[in-house]
Image (cartoon, helix red, strand yellow):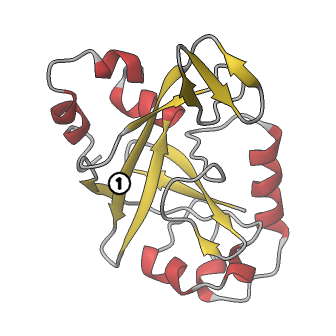
Amino acid sequence: MAREIKLTHNLLIHVVFTETGLQLRSTNATYVFVNPHHLEAELLKEMWQNQEPHHPALQIMPDNYVPIADLLQLQTTQIKGRTFNIKAEITEIETTKEWSYKACPICNQSVLQVNTQWFCTRDGMQEKANTMYRIIVTLSDNTERINAVIFDHAGRQLLGMTCEELAEKEDPINTLYSLMSK
């Protein structure tokens, strides 16, 4: 299940939901894509457009925005397979936790360091690992707030640099704060 969140600068973010509800923190099941150009995104959009609405928040046209407060009132069964647009700002950034993670160069799953190598549960031992964005943020509109995770592709688009480039800066946290009000 995914929700499409449209931020100010015409960025589209898909927020993934679990069977038990909204996924608010990072797990291996959480993905955020900005302007995805793949079949799944098109299928989700088509599914949403062709389904019967049963809630006021579901009765919107694809280019309209749904208030976050309306989305938070929906049950998991009401959001499964549907896409929603919200217009929100990044109002908080969690900087006390890691804002990056080491990922398998093949599948981008989190890896564990084992001596000088990296272990991926899917692809086994790897000689190297990629450093990827995992920025925990709060998105707010004039109705409510929602937690989200900005992963690597979206982070690169929003910050204009790779996670490795940001990590090499003298004060990367200040650069992360540049996301505020975007």
Residue 160 occupies which quadrant of the picture?
top left
Q: Nearer the viewer, residue 86 or 80?
A: 80
Q: Is residue 81 above or below residue 72?
A: above
Residue 170: x and y, percent? Answer: 15, 19
Q: Nearer the viewer, residue 1 or 86?
A: 1
Q: Is residue 145 above or below residue 156?
A: below
Q: Residue at x 74, y 47 (%)?
A: 41
Q: Nearer the viewer, residue 24 or 42?
A: 24
Residue 114 lies left or right of residue 139; in this view the side is right
Q: Neighbour class for label 1 at 10 Å: few (<14), some, many (≥20)?
A: many
Residue 89 occupies which quadrant of the picture?
bottom left
Residue 87: x and y, percent? Answer: 42, 60
**Residue placed under numbered mark 1 in the picture:** 137
Residue 165: x and y, percent? Answer: 34, 15
Q: Is residue 110 above or below residue 45?
A: above
Which quadrant of the figure contains the N terminus? bottom right
Q: Residue at x 77, y 34 (%)?
A: 122
Q: Residue at x 55, y 39 (%)?
A: 34
Residue 177: x and y, percent? Answer: 20, 41
Residue 90 lies left or right of residue 67; in this view the side is left
Q: Is residue 59 above or below residue 26?
A: below
**Amino acid beneath label 1:** Val
User: Residue extending furthest front?
Assistant: 115
